[in-house]
Amino acid sequence: MIPLIETAAPVLALVAIAGYLLGSVPFGLVMARAFGLGDIRQIGSGNIGATNVLRTGNRLAAFLTLILDAGKGGIAVLAARSLFGEDAAQLAGFAAFLGHCFPVFLGFRGGKGVATFLGTLLALFWPAGLAACLTWAVVAGLFRISSLSALVAAASAPIWIAVLGLPQAILVSVLLAVLIFIRHRANITRLLAGEEPKIGQKS
């Protein structure tokens, strides 16, 4: 299901653009440079997200990247909701996620969107967002594999939303989950081959 569309189309277009541009800010790259870690795209997996920043061994830089990447989605949702409504909020969150994955500032080569996904979900419907975060944490604690945790959390998100009672957010959560799986294609291949690195493992 989707929320009732109440916001004018030109306004929704502006919301989408603003959300996308906010999501496009590559905080992993910014944090890596700020901490003197070099170009994060040349380290580990080359990804600009917190998991790859952690591979440098700098936990503070990784933590800040996680918070800022999650904040992109959360701020986009909360700002759009306060200004316009639920339809704009969901669009803004989805656009911020797209911006992180396909940032205009980096030639459309961005991260895999896990932190932004969770931040968006927390802002859209915090009970489901919290449940998805806990799902990630449980899987990470058991298997120590970030990508597996992300995939399970993403797959569980629409279920949590349905069970906890926000049916109008099911569609956007499904779309986000599908994109998470698409962005993790290489990880899925490595998982099936038993070659996926553990959390914090340097490469």
Image: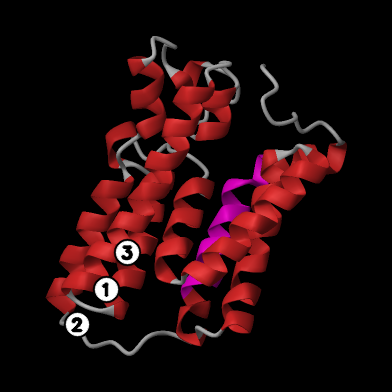
Q: Are marks 1 and 2 in contact (CB under 8 Å)?
A: yes
Residue occupied by mark 1: 88
Query: Which amino acid, mark 2?
Result: Thr
Residue at x 37% of width, y 24% of height = 31
Q: How many marks?
A: 3
Q: Quadrant of the C terminus?
A: top right
Q: Quadrant of residue 96?
A: bottom left
User: In what element is the residue under mark 3?
Assistant: helix
Say which amino acid is labelled 1. Answer: Ala
Question: Is residue 181 part of the magenta span, yes or no?
Answer: yes
- Report the residue at 57% width, 25% height from top: 54
- Residue at the spot of label 2: 7
Q: Is residue 57 above or below residue 82?
A: above
- Residues at marks 1 and 2, CA–CA distance in whole angstroms: 7 Å
Q: Which residue is mark 3?
A: 77
Label drawn at residue 164: none
Q: Which residues are magenta?
A: 172-186
SS assignment at label 2: loop
- The kind of residue on which mark 3 rests is Val
- Depicted 42 relative to depicted 131: above or below: above
